[in-house]
Amino acid sequence: MITPQENFDLQSYNSFGLRVHARFFCAAQSLAQLKSALDFAKQNALPLLVIGGGSNLLLREDFPGLVLQIALRGIETVAEDEGSVTVKAASGENWHQFVCHCLQHEYFGLENLALIPGNVGAAPIQNIGAYGVEVKDFIDEVTVLDIATGDVQVMSAAQCEFAYRDSIFKGRLRAHKIVLSVSFTLHRKTQVNCSYQGLAQALPNNGANASPQEVFAAVCKVRREKLPDPVQLGNAGSFFKNPIISRQVYTDLQAKWPEIPGFEIPQAPQSIKVPAAWLIDQAGWKGKGRGGAQVYEQQALVIVNRHEASPQDIEALANAIIDSVWQRYQVRLEPEVQWVPAFESTQ
């Protein structure tokens, strides 16, 4: 059995550092504790919010139900051959520490995803990505708990329906499954990805012959230079997704703004990904804010809690940015951060 705590302060459980409370809170460190907490929520007809590291959350108000933190731990190597290795990590493991673990054991592939805040359980939900790599390319299986039945199930990567910063866990299974662990198939031999221009420029010889350790170090250096540490300045990392628009819309935008960057998507040849940071920066938002919330001076994609911001400050700033970019470019930004209660577009 697990006894939830009442009127629980969530400030240290969301990386924005917002002063919000949960009616009930518990951290489940085992499957038994997790099931016990779910039973408590069902028996008391409580709304349920499942969290990990709280690094991708905008808690807009006090939560009236049970906030359940998944704190399962453990990393194990489950299969290995000359070329690859399969590593299984519990959902409560810190993501960056897991990347470090893999690199120390010479399991390669995740170096580009170093320093992404949050826990392993969020990786498949969000399909995290950075510097030319998406985690879906290394996920083999995801083990989940069915909230309704209590059954443990294993889902293949194909069943997860991964897309850009998206998965089935953010869609129709959002309120139905809890990620327990994730299995990754990684390389035993050096294979690095330096396709992202900003990363290649941070490496000697534009990344030619770079080692995984050098890629890891470069990623950490670039991220630390551009992104604020949530421990020092509350934030949830990239606040918006990079919008994907049609090639024709991009061509039309280029006619008016020739300098607008865009990146082709191999699996969608008629679509172009445009950096949200460029749109926001060009719209004049860098360093500006609402109340205690501010667009980070060094990276327009990040909203920070500069002066004891309220959830309403961050929400107002985000909506103002969305409206401004829409008015200027007719491109609609969508939050990458999970809003609780859910985001509703003002347009």
Image (spheres, rainbow, N blue to C red):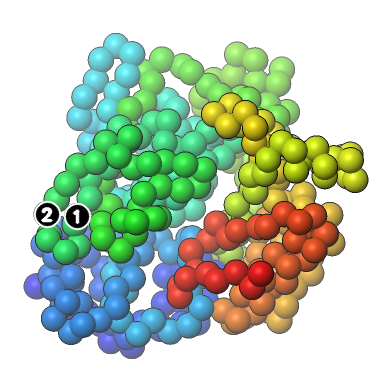
Is residue 141 among what the camera can see?
no
Which label was assigned to residue 252? none
Ranked by sequence position, the earlier of labels 2 and 1 is 1
| Mark 2 to mark 1 CA distance (whole Å) | 6 Å
Q: Residue furthest front?
A: 248
Is residue 68 among what the camera can see?
yes
Quadrant of image for the C terminus: bottom right
Q: Which residue is mark 2?
A: 151
Q: Residue furthest bottom?
A: 7
Badge 2 amino acid: Asp
Residue 171: x %, y % from top left:
39, 55
- Pick whichever, 109 or 317, lies toward us: 317
Residue 89: x %, y % from top left:
28, 42
Badge 1 amino acid: Leu
Q: Which residue is mark 1?
A: 145
Total numbered labels placed on residues in the image? 2
Is 232 situated above or below 24?
above
- Pick whichever, 51 or 265, lies toward us: 265
Q: Residue at x 62, y 28 (%)?
A: 269
Circle 1 crowding by C-alpha within 10 Å: few under 14, some 14–19, many from 20: many
Asked whether the residues under the numbered discs 2 and 1 touch, taking CB atoms below 8 Å apart as contact, a structural biologist would say yes
Residue 222: x %, y % from top left:
66, 41
Q: Does residue 21 appear left or right of residue 263 in this picture?
A: left
Q: Residue at x 72, y 78 (%)?
A: 290
